[in-house]
Image (spheres, rainbow, N blue to C red):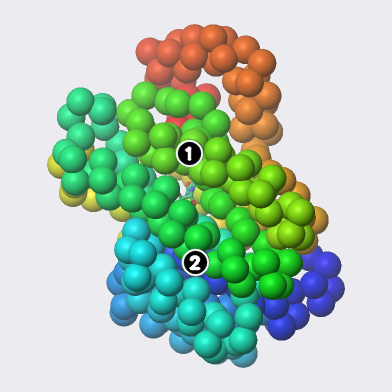
Amino acid sequence: MRKDYFKDQVALISGASRGVGFALARKLVEAGAKVVITARTEKRLLDSEAKLKALGGSVVSVVGDVSNWDDAQKMVQAAVDNFGRLDILVNNAGISMRGNFADLSIEVIRQVAETNLMGSIYLSRAAIPFLKSSKGHLVFISSIVGLFGVPGSSIYCASKGALKGLCESLRLELHPLGVHVGIVYLGFTEHDPEKRILRPDGTGSPPDRPAHHSQAYAADLIIRLIEKRKAKVVMTPIGKIGAVVSRLFPGFVERAVLFAQSRNLGIYQRFS
Ligand SMILES: NC(=O)c1ccc[n+]([C@@H]2O[C@H](COP(=O)([O-])OP(=O)(O)OC[C@H]3O[C@@H](n4cnc5c(N)ncnc54)[C@H](OP(=O)(O)O)[C@@H]3O)[C@@H](O)[C@H]2O)c1
């Protein structure tokens, strides 16, 4: 991390009561940033706020749902009201699902699509006027499976893939105004015990696969993207290879995923 880069910068991180969002908030607080964290569950959010304040941070928490336009506006306004500006928005709040598309309840489809896509759209729409003033950073947290689809994760892949299009479009719109727009494609990362993945009926199950990277490592990747004003970062060598090969040889990747899935190979689990 570049010394003093984040000092007194104002960052809004959605979904930062736990997981990657909290790890990022902690690193930014340690680097001297002022941070607004958000989530739906008040108790956990307040606990996380207290932990960050114990590190000496200037921290505000806002309870709300990113898929609600009024709540999204409230989150952005909290940054401006409390700290006078907004330099960094990290669209991190997200939710995963597992199951075949035909079995998914409409509520699961709606919740995943609205949180992952509409949540990022609403927060970005509310934040951009302030990011223009600060010539700041607009960051999207996607997934390696936002680069190519895998079976059993259709709505998650669709919503994370849509962030790519949103990010690329906004990068071109906002480049002349000096706003940096970047996207991070995370791979399977260490999870908190409370993390739940939606089953087709909407009940939650804990993640069923071993993580390959720590939350701190994921936070470091996001920080590097911001500091260097990079367009994108892809986690893991296998994710990087997958990103290139899927662009150049999409049929090959499809065949490889189907082959790995049919034999339950580890490489499939690394992607999904
Ligand atoms: N962990 C991985 O392996 C992995 C891999 C690729 C991509 N990602 C992406 O990285 C991001 C963080 O993942 P994570 O593993 O840290 O997730 P996590 O542990 O499940 O944390 C998600 C955070 O988002 C909040 N949240 C969920 N839905 C929300 C909503 N509608 N409105 C506001 N806040 C909401 C949660 O709090 P509440 O539930 O209280 O709202 C929580 O603070 C997500 O976008 C995820 O898709 C993760």
| 54, above or below 136, in the image | below
For label 1, the residue is 162
Q: Which quadrant would the N terminus be assigned to in this image?
A: bottom right
Residue sitting nearer the eye, 165 or 147: 165
Q: Residue at x 31, y 78 (%)?
A: 42
199 relative position to 176: left or right: left
Q: Quadrant of residue 240?
A: top right
* Mark number displayed over residue 126: 2
Viewer-nearest of labels 1 and 2? Answer: 2
83 relative position to 258: left or right: right
| 209, above or below 179, in the image | above
Residue 93, how many percent across, how many down? 44, 58
Residue sitting nearer the eye, 165 or 100: 165
Dot 1, crowdedness within 10 Å: few (<14), some or many (≥20)?
some
The number of numbered badges drawn on the structure is 2
Name which residue type carries label 2. Answer: Ala
Say what secondary structure mark 2 lies in: helix
Say what secondary structure mark 1 lies in: helix
Q: In which quarter of the image is residue 245?
A: top right
| 219, above or below 49, in the image | above
Residue sitting nearer the eye, 202 or 84: 84
Dot 2, crowdedness within 10 Å: few (<14), some or many (≥20)?
some
Residue sitting nearer the eye, 197 or 226: 226
Q: Which quadrant would the C terminus be assigned to in this image?
A: top left
**The image quadrant in which ligand 1 is located:** bottom left
Q: Which residue is drawn at 34% across and 45% down?
A: 113
Query: Can residue 93 be seen here?
Result: no
Q: Pointers 1 and 2 in contact (CB under 8 A)?
A: no
Query: Can residue 167 be seen here?
Result: yes
Label whose residue precedes the other's in the sequence (1 or 2): 2
Q: Residue at x 49, y 66 (%)?
A: 126
